[in-house]
Image (spheres, rainbow, N blue to C red):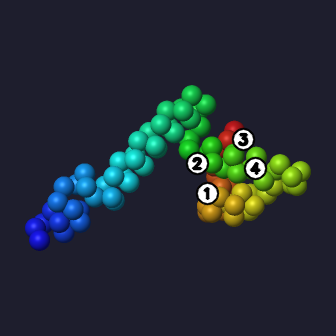
């Protein structure tokens, strides 16, 4: 076993599932950012807005705690992001 096998678990980085997952994730994030830049939104802002929209479909009042719980995000972060969107 050589150092490459230890680091990547494969002889070449391209053969490592972790490396391939990282590449795909990076490409996906880049595409999301390009699309959301047109709307002047961050990915986090978009996710929280989409979560709020989904939760409000049944007509109930949606709270920041509901959004945090549904999106599995920190309550304080939700508060700060929503405050930024309001201004």
Q: What residue does disc 4 label?
A: 54
The tag earlier along the polypeptide, 4 or 3, is 4
For label 3, the SS is helix
Left or right of 86, for residue 29: left
- Closest to the observer, 56 or 64: 56
Does residue 68 appear in the picture of this structure? Answer: yes
For label 1, the SS is helix
The tag earlier along the polypeptide, 3 or 2, is 2
Residue furthest left in the image: 2
Q: Distance between the residues labelled 1 and 2?
A: 10 Å
Where is 27 relative to 75, above or below?
A: above
The tag earlier along the polypeptide, 1 or 2, is 2
Nearest to viewer (mark 1 / mark 2): 2
- Closest to the observer, 48 or 87: 48
Q: Distance between the residues labelled 4 and 2?
A: 15 Å
Q: What residue does disc 2 label?
A: 44
Residue 44: % across, % down: 58, 48
Where is 5 relative to 79, above or below?
A: below
Residue 11: % across, % down: 17, 60
CB within 8 Å, label 1 to label 2? yes
Q: Distance between the residues labelled 1 and 4?
A: 19 Å
Q: Residue drawn 79% across and 57% down?
A: 63
Does residue 76 appear in the picture of this structure? Answer: no
Q: What residue does disc 3 label?
A: 86
Count neighbours of disc 4 (C-alpha within 10 A) and say few if under 14, some if 14 to 19, many if 20 or more: few
The tag earlier along the polypeptide, 1 or 3, is 1
- Residue 39: quarter of image: top right
Residue 22: % across, % down: 36, 52
- Residue 78: quarter of image: bottom right
For label 2, the SS is helix
Q: What residue does disc 1 label?
A: 77
Where is 75 relative to 52, above or below?
A: below
């Amino acid at each position: 076993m050589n150092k490459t096998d230890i680091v990547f678990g494969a002889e070449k980085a391209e053969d490592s599932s972790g490396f391939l997952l990282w590449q795909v994730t990076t490409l996906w994030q880049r595409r999301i950012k390009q699309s959301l830049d047109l709307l002047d939104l961050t990915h986090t802002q978009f996710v929280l807005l989409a979560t709020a929209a989904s939760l409000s479909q049944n007509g109930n009042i949606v709270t920041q705690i509901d959004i945090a719980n549904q999106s599995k995000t920190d309550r304080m972060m939700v508060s700060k992001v929503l405050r930024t969107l309001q201004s």
